[in-house]
Amino acid sequence: MDRIHVMELVRSFQVGEIDRRTFLKRATTAIGSLAAANTLLAACAAFPNEDAPPVIDESQPAAAPGMATEGDLTVGIVDYPDTDDETLMGYLAYPTNGQAAPGIIVIQEWWGLNDHIKDVARRLANEGFVVLAPDLYHGQVATEPDEARKLVMELDNAEAVKEIQQAIAYLQAQENVSGDKVGVVGFCMGGGLVLRTALASDNVGAAVVYYGQPLDPAEASQVKAPILTFIGTEDNIPVEGVEAMHAAFEQAGIKNEYHVYEGAQHAFFNDTRESYNEQAAADAWPRTLAWFHENLG
């Protein structure tokens, strides 16, 4: 369970940003149990927060329901429809100044939409982008490898790509998102999904892959967006596969670039893990920003 996500739901319900039905639906998804969600709802009713309304900065545009202001950013959980008229959710972050900016999708690692991925979304938003991290596990977050492995095995990759495309459509519909296309960046499992999305969608203007499973050369030649890839020599994904993919990009005339970091392990960018490699991460981040600015405007 994502504790911060549940706390955001409780706050949103107590200050009137969401109704009882919406609270129960989202809490059930986050906790995994309708009974537990009802218990939480009862606790909210027993301990109302009527004396603690949200702080409103009248010098800035008002945040939408479910959103809150944090420094120079507006952040929070939003929902949007999928192709079957069901509800999808994601973590949205954007500069509060209201200026239009390019949109970027952040795709989670196998752990889910956790605090690290939300932090990456905020870091991009602080660089002037409008950022959405779709919740591909629908409220579930893993903290142990066995949990993450189970969630990955249950994930339908084709369906995940469809959900990412719905997230792209959501961003494109926002008034504060500029340009006809959006950027997509992903890590680990999310890196592989970035490539699958760039293969399937015409709406990706730039893609950044952190240690994602590479496409085979035949698939790579069909990609529809510029691709930037980062990989470490100690990754469990062979560097040779990444090199072969980028050779196919080159042959097909697809704008591309890749960087190999000596000694870096899988998940070298995740600063909450032992695999974190400060030197590699510090080099990759400005390259990521430059790639998006160059290709998204």
Image (tube, rainbow, N blue to C red):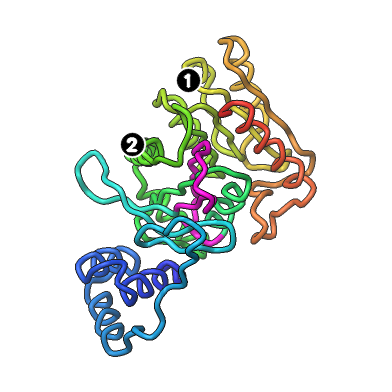
SS of the residue at dot 2? Answer: helix
From this view, report whether residue 96 is shown above or below residue 99: below
Number of other residues with Cα within 10 Å of mark 2, as a class: few under 14, some 14 to 19, many 20 or more: some
SS of the residue at dot 1? Answer: loop
Q: Quadrant of residue 246?
A: top right
Toward the viewer: 60 or 203?
Answer: 60
- The earlier-in-sequence mark between 2 and 1 is 2
Q: Quadrant of residue 127?
A: top right
Q: Residue at x 53, y 38 (%)?
A: 101
Q: Amino acid at mark 1?
A: Lys
The magenta segment: 92-115
Q: Give residue 77's position: percent from left, percent from top.
A: 40, 58
Q: Which residue is mark 1?
A: 224
Q: Does 274 sit left or right of 68 as displayed?
A: right
Q: Does 244 sit left or right of 140 as displayed?
A: right
Residue 162, disc: 2
